[in-house]
Structure formats: structure tokens, C-alpha cells
Image (cartoon, grey):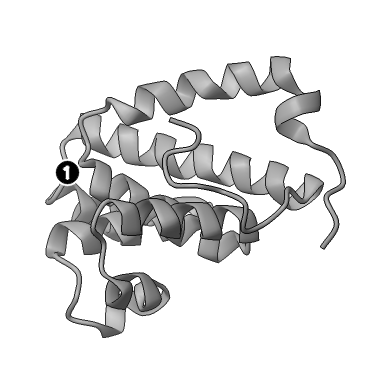
Amino acid sequence: MEQRINFLEKGQNAVKSLYGIGGYLAKCTAEQSIMELVALRVSQINGCAFCLDMHSKDLRAHGETEQRIYTLNAWRETPFFSEKERAALMWAEAVANCKVPDETYSEVRKQFSEEELIDLTMQVSATNLWNQINIAFRPLVGTYQPGQYN
């Protein structure tokens, strides 16, 4: 795929507004390993190649196993994820698809505080936004280095 627009360069003012959300999420109450799993799962749902490359590299850099990365899209059928991670992934899928039934909310609240649930929701929303931008403008996939945007 050929890059359409270098959004990070041409859209600097717009990007600055998005970095504030990223800064908040980097310091939020939810576990960062779970937040990164959520970002990868949402990027799988949306089919964002750039974000899939980025989040899988960041997860590896933080010690995530290949097995868990490769089976993330089938998390329900694997024994590799904790109950808390499963709840976060359930929430991520529901929010990303804009369908959050009461049963899902009740199940997820068993694992997360209200503040953590807000943080997870912000992570899903921010990832959705970045996915949409990257799908639209097609940044060069494969060029990301772990921690590049920290």
C-alpha cells in the first residue's frame, strides 16, 4: 500500500490534540499490559495494519509472548488470558462494536473499578480514532519501532 498523507507531519496541530489522550492513558489506573492488549484487539477488529504492527511490537518489547499475541483474536478459546484480561477484551469488543449489553457491563465491573472502566473505554475510543486515521491515510506499515511515540 502506498501512503496517502503523512498525517503526523501534515496534521501536526490535529496530532497534538490526540497526544493529550495518549499521555493520560499512559499514566491511568488500568494496567498498561491490559491497555496494550486492548489496543491490539481493537486494531484487529478494525483491520488497521499500522496499529497491528505497532501494538504487537510494543507488546513484545514489554515481554508479551508470541503465543498470546498470535491467539488474541481467539482469546475466548484459549487458556492464555487471565479473568481480568478476558473482561477487558470483552469490554473492548463490545465498545468497539458500539454494542454494550447490560450483561457485559455487569461481568466487566466484577474485574474493574469505575475509574479503570473509564480508562479502558478511553483506550478503546482512542484506538478506534487512530485506526480510522491510519486506515484513511495509510502510513507506511513496518516502519514503527517500539516506544517510538512515547
**Residue with the most extreme bottom position:** 77
Residue 64 against residue 79 in the figure, above or below: above
Tell me which residue sits at (22%, 37%) in the image. Answer: 30
Tell me which residue sits at (45%, 50%) in the image. Answer: 95
Instruction: Identify the residue position indicated by label 1 in the image.
Output: 112
x and y percent of residue 55 in the render?
Answer: 45, 53
Name which quarter of the figure residue 119 lies in.
top left
x and y percent of residue 77 in the render?
Answer: 28, 85
On screen, residue 80 versus residue 16, left or right, reads left
x and y percent of residue 64 in the render?
Answer: 26, 61
Question: Does residue 99 show up?
Answer: no
Q: Residues within 10 Å of mark 1 (few under 14, many from 20)?
A: some
x and y percent of residue 40 in the render?
Answer: 44, 57
On screen, residue 6 versus residue 150, left or right, reads right
Name which quarter of the figure residue 50 lies in.
bottom right
Q: Which secondary structure lies at badge 1? A: loop
> 14 or 110, which is in the foreground?
14
Question: Does residue 145 show up?
Answer: yes
* Image quadrant where one finds the N terminus: bottom right
Residue 2 against residue 74 in the figure, above or below: above
